Image (tube, rainbow, N blue to C red):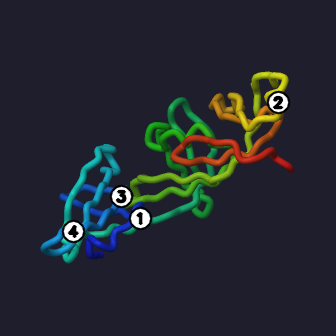
Amino acid sequence: MKVNAITLRSGNVIEYNGKLCVVVKNEISSPGKGASVAQIEMRNIRTGNKDNVRFRTQETVERVRLEQTDYQFLYFAGDDIVLMNNETYDQITVTKEQMGPQSAYLQDGMIVEVETYEEEPLGFKIPDRIVMEIVEAEPVVKGQTATTSYKPAILDNGEKVMVPPHIVSGTKIVVKLEDGVGTYVERYKG
């Protein structure tokens, strides 16, 4: 589907020079004279290379529609991740490298939204908030609880996260994922 370059938003996928690219940033600038231009920062989906391209606002680009399908995480097989389509029971195997840093937060039975283009998996989205258990946390230093300082802790998946001083080993917490990095939200109350 052809769209004006000025209407592109972060997260849109376009076909540019025969390559699939995801829009990272779109800035529209109006020079003193002449027409406005759209400065598009995009990342090649397959290679990860970034590129900056300037389009005139009336130029059109080919926007690609990706199919979103829910898959269930089954298990790790070395560096591979096995997922199952909940409707057809078909299984696909992707690598940890393809899924990126969020693969460290996969849990048994977790639903993963897989974005595909011509049946090739390109993007993955796991839930934004995940319940994890602290397996190791530094002890509280006397007087530290009155301040808003955080201390390092290790989650049950081996990832590090900064937590408030009152959190100890064995505590379940809610972790929010942003760009594959987990941050403490709150103590789990379930």
**Amino acid type assigned to the residue bearing label 4 in the image:** Val
Percent x, y for residue 148?
Answer: 74, 38
> Which residue is label 4 attached to?
37
Q: Is residue 16 above or below residue 47?
A: below
Q: Earlier in the sequence, mark 3 or mark 4?
A: 3
**Amino acid type assigned to the residue bearing label 1 in the image:** Leu
Q: Residue at x 80, y 44 (%)?
A: 187
Q: CA distance from mark 1 to mark 3?
A: 19 Å
> Which residue is label 2 attached to?
168
Q: Residue at x 69, y 48 (%)?
A: 130
Q: CA distance from mark 4 to mark 2?
A: 53 Å
**Amino acid type assigned to the residue bearing label 2 in the image:** Val
Quarter-wise, where is residue 34 in the image? Answer: bottom left
Percent x, y for residue 163?
Answer: 72, 36
Percent x, y for residue 96?
Answer: 49, 37
Foreground: disc 1 or disc 2: 2
Are discs 4 and 1 less than 8 Å apart at CB? no
